[in-house]
Each structure stands twice: as C-alpha cells, then as structure tokens.
Amino acid sequence: MFSGSMVALVTPFKEGKVDEKKLRELVDFHIKNGTDGLVPCGTTGESATLSFEEHEKVVEVVIDQAKGKVPVIAGSGSNNTEEALKLTKHAKEAGAKGALIITPYYNKPTQKGMYLHFEKIAKEVDIPIVLYNVPGRTSVNLLPETVAKLAKIDNIVGIKEASGDLKQASDIVGLCGDKFDLISGDDFIVLPMLALGGKGVISVVANLVPAEMAALVDEFNKGDLEKTREIHYKIFPLCKAMFIETNPGPVKTAMALQGLLDTPELRLPLAPMSEENVEKLKKVLMDFYN
C-alpha cells in the first residue's frame, strides 16, 4: 500500500516554536523532488518533545500543504496506548492516508503487550497502520512472529523495520508475504532491504537529498542494479553522517548549512552538535556536492 521514498520529515523550529511557513516550504520541496510520501511527527520530527497541540497542528499543516499529491502517513505513536489512540484518531480525522505507530518505548512491554497495544488501536481506528520497530530507540524488539500475528489484522498494512537486522527482515517477508509492506527504517540498508522484498524506505537523509533517495528506489524497481548501486554508494557517506550524533541533530544541521532550514534548532534534551562533529559533517557535504 505504501512504497517508494518516503521522508521522515523534520519539524522546523524558530525561537522555540514550530515554524509553519518553513514546514510548508519543506512539503513543497519534497513534492517537487520526487518524494513518494511524507511522514511527519516521527522520531526525526521530534515527536517526543511536541505538545499534543503542536503534534496535531504539524500533521494538519503537512496534509493541507500536500493537497493529496502524495500520501501523508502521520506519526501517532506513544508509550501510552491511550495517547497513541488519541493521536491516531486525530490522524484519520485530519485526512492522513495512514498512521506510523512506534512500539511503546521505556515501558519495555512483552510481545503480548505490544500485540495488544497495536490490536487495540487498529480495532478502534479504521486507518491503514504501519508498525514501527526501532529497538535502538525503544529497548524492545517487535519479533517477526508478533508482526505476522498483527499482519492478520486488516488495517495493519506494513512495518517500518529499523532493527538493522536483515535476517529479521527476511523472516518478516517469509511469514507475512508480499502483500504486507516491508519498509526500511535505515538509510544504510535500503538497497539490501529492497532486494529482500522491501517496498521502500522512510528516510532521514531524504530530508536533505530527496531526489537521490527517490532515484535509488526507482532505479531498483526498473531493474537497473548498476545504477541503484551507484546511487547507494554516492549517498552512503551522507547516510552515515546523519548519525554522527543523535538524529535529527545532524540532518537539521546539514539542512541549515544547505539553506533548506533557517536554523538547525532542536528541542531539549537534544542539544546543538559539537563543533568537531559539525566540521566532520561539513566535509562530508563538501565531498558530496563537489
């Protein structure tokens, strides 16, 4: 149902507030550059530090500005099932085409707890749901067997798999089949994930180079593996640079350096990048663009 290069959209801030004007500009930038889907209010969108009002406003603005040209999959996860339910209901009411829901973080639920969490939301909100598994952020790993059980629920349509484990990704495809969307959650391994049967990526680096990430997926789907590999190795240093500090610090800094953001402002407890790492980032950008 969801495929291609989808961007894990950053949330621009200006003097502590969401910069709606810049957010609208970013939506236009992505549509112009071939991005296949917009994913606001995920990890890269700093959802954990947005108020409910801000979260809902960001989703509404992105949907309004996209004007149906590309699907919007709204981040609506929480470690509190009732909060996730509220945000997912809002996503549907606002007109999102889907909801991206992260595994509950901090609580460290069992596989049964995660199943019941997603089942409750899916049964109460009739919207296509993409599961989001990122153990490095949440301290829990949604196992393929649990994914397969959840895939039997009609409106759970895919998973953003960000464990970095290609065996786990293979198991998901083997258990769930081709109709369930495997989506890469790691920019480093988009190419191998596509080779395993993945449908696309929800990407951090696409905030910076949307056309290149869209081209990587497009060339793979055309069957041009040589061109796909060429793009992979071209953007690979950028992908690595996006994680020299906690995401989204590097990508916001890179976007500001390239004029895509007015400021790389983050919300505490995230802090501005160290000068040493900014210099490393500048070198990677210089190598990429020259």
Image (tube, helix red, strand yellow):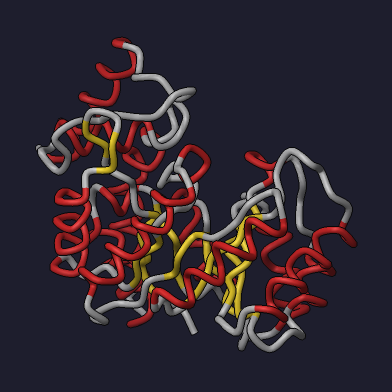
Q: Nearer the viewer, residue 233 or 197?
A: 197
Judging depth in this view, the residue of 41 and 251 nearest the camera is 41
Q: For residue 236, which quarter of the picture?
A: top left
**Residue 6: percent from the left, percent from the top?**
37, 65
Q: Which residue is painted at 34% across and 19% down in the image?
A: 272
Measured as percent of width and height from the top left, residue 245 is found at 44, 25
Residue 79 to residue 31: above or below: above
Say left or right for 126 vs 257.
right
Query: Which quadrant does the C terminus fall into?
Result: top left
Can you tell which quarter of the image residue 212 is in?
bottom left
Identity of the residue drawn at 59% across and 63% down = 86
Lateral position of residue 39 relative to residue 211, left or right: right
Query: Which x, y percent locates residue 180?
Result: 63, 82
Q: What's the residue at 70%, 44% (across, down)?
A: 105
Task: Please state which of residues 27 and 182 is positioned toward the viewer in this rendering.
Answer: 27
Q: Is residue 227 visible?
A: no
Residue 222 in view of the camera: yes
Q: Is residue 274 left or right of residue 179?
A: left
- Residue at screen point 83% across, 67% down: 116
Instruction: Give the camera-side residue of 95 and 175.
Output: 95
As drawn, 60 above or below 2: above
